Amino acid sequence: MAKILLVDDEPSILSVLSTLLKAEGHEVTPALGGAKGRELLSAAEFDLMISDIRMADMDGMQLLRVARKEQPQMAVIMITAYGSVETAVEAMKQGAFDYVTKPFKVDELLITVQRALEYSTAVKENVDLKAKLEARYRFENIVAESPAMRKVCEMIERVAHTDATVLIIGESGTGKELVAKAIHAHSKRKKNKFVPINCAALPEPLLESELFGHVKGAFTGATANKEGLFEVASGGTLLLDEIGSMPLSIQGKLLRALQEKEIRRVGGTETIAVDVRVLAATNTPLEKLIEEGKFREDLYYRLSVIPIEIAPLRQRPEDIMPLVYHMLRQEVGEGKPLPEIERDAQLVLERYGWPGNVRELENAIRHAVTFAKGNRITKDDLPAKIVSAVDLSAVGSGTPVQDFRGTSLKAFLRAKEKEYLMQVLQKMGGDKEKAAKALNISLATLYRKLPEPEK
């Protein structure tokens, strides 16, 4: 049932149209004249407005302009006894969905109303989808379609405004530095520096000097005093990436810096107060390193005040295609059409295990854009090792987007949802309880969303 506003200055027309549309199950609000129509547009929301063009107090073209401003998502049908091309063109230019001429045929009018309502629904769904997409990308380049990544975004929102130490855990390539940057960008320290350092990339003496600085003459080649990154990042955020690779000898100094909020340069005797928020990241479980005697337990508890775990890409397949389109947009630039992805290429992207996670996916998309011919990406444009790892013969072809032309957005999204549900169910060996858990929905919801079994 749709809410329809009828506007005409002839009571007989209002009566006939009201009776006709109410018989179709719609909620109809009649307005005698354009002025009354304008008043009702400001007072309530409608899915459709049907208005005469020629009215004494306020003509339909004036009312159409008001409707576009007051309710831009509402469809508008204009009625005129003067069905000239000029009038129709002008109405369409002003934003009318369609027009009908007097005397109109009932079937023609009802078909036009149905098409206009489908259009209005699609516009509203598109606005909702756009809002969801904006929310999905609300943390710079973080795509959060999956429940796991939405949880990460929620954690970022909660911890960003604090000064708590955060330990970011995840496999290589999952985007740990991206999460750290998002925390900094949404914190009260965002106007100051974000300084990352890879603890695995530097030998012990150089790492200590990089972190804490050194004084002149502290070692061979130390010809002048040097600030460490704790000082460089003063007032901002310091990310200690691959913290599990930090030598034990430096871990003790790091612990003191976190506890006392002061450091001492290599070879120096004076302590220097520092105001730095420390974030740490690791792709190795620190608990395992503690058991092996390679990491201090007291430092672990100091660093993991708030742990954030990023799931590997293979555990959140619903993030893959949103990431692909986001990466394509970065590659081709704003304002340019995105390449079309052929179905086989999409299947490869969705079914590959991505051991290198988001970083590997990003490299694959760059490869595809480089080798794509025209504005279409095929599976042959993807890296050969990725294509060879996916057996397309064992995968259903799914439903191409082209097959949905002429259907509503709601019908398309419903079909894609069912397709994805069946994919997850297949991965879980047909176990509906496991599938529901993986989808983060109730078992009852899964049964309701699954396609009806064939009889």
Image: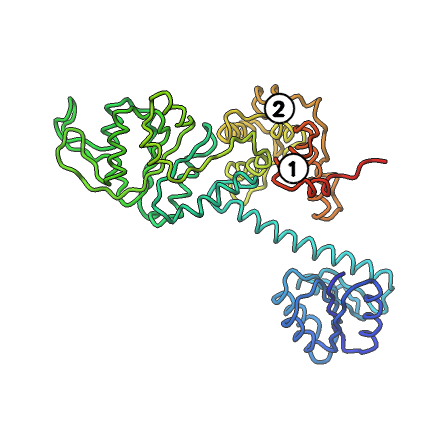
Task: Name which quarter of the figure residue 35 lies in.
Answer: bottom right
Q: Position of residue 71 (x, y in %)?
A: 63, 64
Q: Amino acid at mark 2?
A: Asp
Q: Position of residue 160 (x, y in %)?
A: 40, 46
107 on left or right of 33? right
Residue drawn at point x = 66 percent, y = 69 percent: 44
The 10 Å Cα crowd at callout 1, few under 14, some 14 to 19, many 20 or more, is many
Residue drawn at point x = 30 percent, y = 44 percent: 236
Quadrant in which the C terminus appears: top right
Residue drawn at point x = 27 percent, y = 38 percent: 258
In the image, residue 105 above or below residue 273? below
| 106 or 314, nearer to the observer | 314
Q: Which residue is mark 2?
A: 380
Residue 90 appears in the rendering: no
Discs 1, 2 touching: Cβ within 8 Å: no
Residue 311 appears in the rendering: yes
The 10 Å Cα crowd at callout 2, few under 14, some 14 to 19, many 20 or more, is few
| 253 or 336, nearer to the observer | 253
Indicate which label's residue lies in the foreground, 1 or 2. 1
Q: Amino acid at mark 1?
A: Ala
256 on left or right of 316? left
Chain-order first, disc 1 or disc 2: 2
Q: Position of residue 400 (x, y in %)?
A: 71, 35
